[in-house]
Amino acid sequence: MPRKTRRRRGILVVVSGPSGVGKSTVVKRLLKLEKNLKLSISATTRPPRPGESHGEHYYFVTQAEFDRMVKRNEFLEWAKVHGYYYGTPLKQLKDELARSKNVVSEVDVQGAASMKQMVEDGKLAVTAVFIFLIPPSVDILAFRLKKRKTEDEEVVNYRLRAAIAELQVMEKYDYIVVNDKVESAAEKIRAIINVEKERTLLN
Ligand code: 5GP
């Protein structure tokens, strides 16, 4: 008798990497390449940078709003990064995965570590793949951070030190992708997603 086929849930693709490595640019390119991939939009107390808009890059919220969301357990995880709060809203992520969409989530190393723990403990019943994006060299990272010109020198230096610390944890990830060129980094992540999708068939 034919078995009723269950619709396969999407997979969660977690992308981390040092500030200035170009995560957002690579993810943006990836979203263009992969139509079945949706972006998890985080909430943050950080003010928007020029060109960023509410509901597209982040949900820009006040500290009071963020605290309310924490109290109501609306976040899958949240963390303080470079002096501001960032959190992954749970509902949107779960809904997209249930609709068989793959979801890409751009979080810092703390966020990725908590997600990994939740998956391992069975508290987050999803197939997740953890990808760490690295710059071709630290010099290039410093250059990119300075070129961004949206932060003053003190912030750039602080982020650079944090980036070097973040690089130490990369072996905890499933894949390390070098962002030499946006197109090729996005293609590499796309290939990883396609392979991981097949792996879920075996589970
Ligand atoms: P930025 O301010 O440059 O957009 O992001 C700063 C850092 O916060 C980046 O490493 C980014 O990946 C991370 N981040 C963005 N959203 C979230 C989130 O929802 N949770 C966590 N833990 N980190 C996040």
Image (cartoon, rainbow, N blue to C red):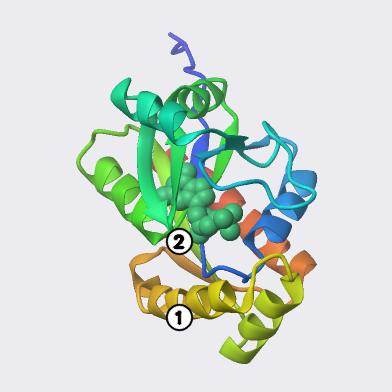
Instruction: Residue at the far left: name it.
Output: 121
Report which residue position mark 1 lands on. 161
The C terminus sits in image quarter: top left
Vertical arrangement, residue 59 with respect to residue 52, above or below: above
Whether residue 198 can be seen here = no
Looking at numbered disc 1 in the image, what kind of residue is underneath it? Arg
Locate residue 151 relative to residue 124 in the image: left or right.
right
Whether residue 172 can be seen here = yes
Vertical arrangement, residue 164 with respect to residue 20, above or below: below
User: Secondary structure under badge 1?
Assistant: helix
Q: Residue at x 36, y 31 (%)?
A: 67
Rendered location of residue 8, percent (x, y)? 50, 26
- Picture quadrant of residue 101: top right
Q: How many marks?
A: 2
User: Secondary structure under badge 2?
Assistant: loop
Answer few, some or many: residues within 10 Å of disc 1's Cα (few below 14, many 20 plus, some between 14 and 19).
some
Q: Residue at x 32, y 55 (%)?
A: 113
Which residue occupies the foreground of this view, 141 or 118? 141
Answer with mark 1 or mark 2, whichever residue precedes in sequence.
Answer: 2
Which residue occupies the foreground of this view, 179 or 60? 60
Rendered location of residue 171, percent (x, y)? 36, 73
Vertical arrangement, residue 3 with respect to residue 185, above or below: above
- Picture quadrant of residue 139: bottom right
Locate residue 69 relative to residue 135 in the image: left or right.
left
Rendered location of residue 147, percent (x, y)? 75, 77
Locate residue 161 relative to residue 49 in the image: left or right.
left
Say which mark, if any, is on residue 82: 2
Vertical arrangement, residue 202 with respect to residue 2, above or below: below
Q: CA distance from mark 1 to mark 2?
A: 11 Å
The residue at label 2 has a CB less than 8 Å from ligand 1: yes
Rendered location of residue 95, percent (x, y)? 51, 20
Q: Residue at x 79, y 46 (%)?
A: 32
